[in-house]
Image: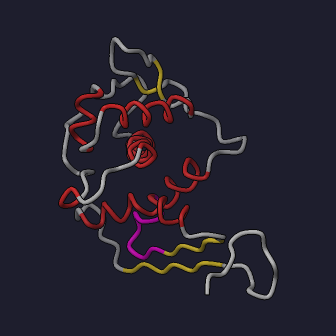
Amino acid sequence: MVVTQENVAVNDSRRLSPQQIADTLRERIRTGELKAGDRLPTQAELADEFGVERGTVRQALGLLQTDGLLSNVSKGSPPRIADVAPTRDGPQPTMVGLAPRLTEAFSVPHVRIDAACLTAETLMMAISEPVRQIHDGRLRPQSIDVRILLPSRDITLAFPVPVP
């Protein structure tokens, strides 16, 4: 795997979170760029690629290990991509299920996303990778339509609360 600067924030304006790094690596696994049995780059190489500290990379790798995507996670050698993909039978954290689907949605010329959300935070985190790929010129959709279904303002919800 070639180490690139594709995921470093523009002008170093903000650092990537462990979740964002894990999402990027998860997408590489999903698309087959990283295959079962492949070794990941070292923590130092990943830290350099993403422009973060090694501790941030360790946290991202921990997220992937928890999801069952990595094997041979130890201090002595870089982890490998797990041979068996995790099952999607049970509930998953939002970013595990949503981010790959949104990235896949952006692979067609006319992108259409319908989302039911209580907050924009989850949607924004999930859409960050396709937006980076558009910015880098790796994705070039002709159009993007996003519809967001929000709860009625006439009902009382514990969360979210309208701010005047």
Q: From the image, which quarter does the N terminus lie in? A: top left
Q: Quadrant of residue 89?
A: top right
Q: From the image, which quarter does the C terminus lie in? A: bottom right
In the rendered image, the vertical position of residue 149 relative to residue 88, given as above or below: below
Going by the picture, which residue comes out furthest to the front?
164
Residue extent of the magenta highlight = 104-111
Q: Is residue 106 magenta?
A: yes
Give the residue displayed 42% in from the left and 78% down from the top.
Answer: 144
Q: How far from the left and from the top, in percent, is residue 156? A: 81, 79
In the rendered image, the vertical position of residue 7 relative to residue 102, given as above or below: above
Give the residue displayed 19% in from the left and 44% down from the top.
Answer: 4
Q: How far from the left and from the top, in percent, is residue 88? A: 65, 42
Give the residue displayed 43% in from the left and 27% down from the top.
Answer: 81
Q: Quadrant of residue 150?
A: bottom right
Horizontal side of residue 135 vs 94, given as left or right: left
> How was this image coloured?
secondary structure
Horizontal side of residue 135 vs 160, given as left or right: left
In the rendered image, the vertical position of residue 140 relative to residue 163, given as above or below: above
Give the residue displayed 34% in from the left and 78% down from the top.
Answer: 142
Horizontal side of residue 62 vs 21, given as left or right: right
Going by the picture, which residue comes out furthest to the top?
76
Q: How far from the left and from the top, in percent, is residue 138? A: 26, 60
In the rendered image, the vertical position of residue 109 relative to residue 39, given as above or below: below
Q: How far from the left and from the top, in percent, is residue 52? A: 28, 41
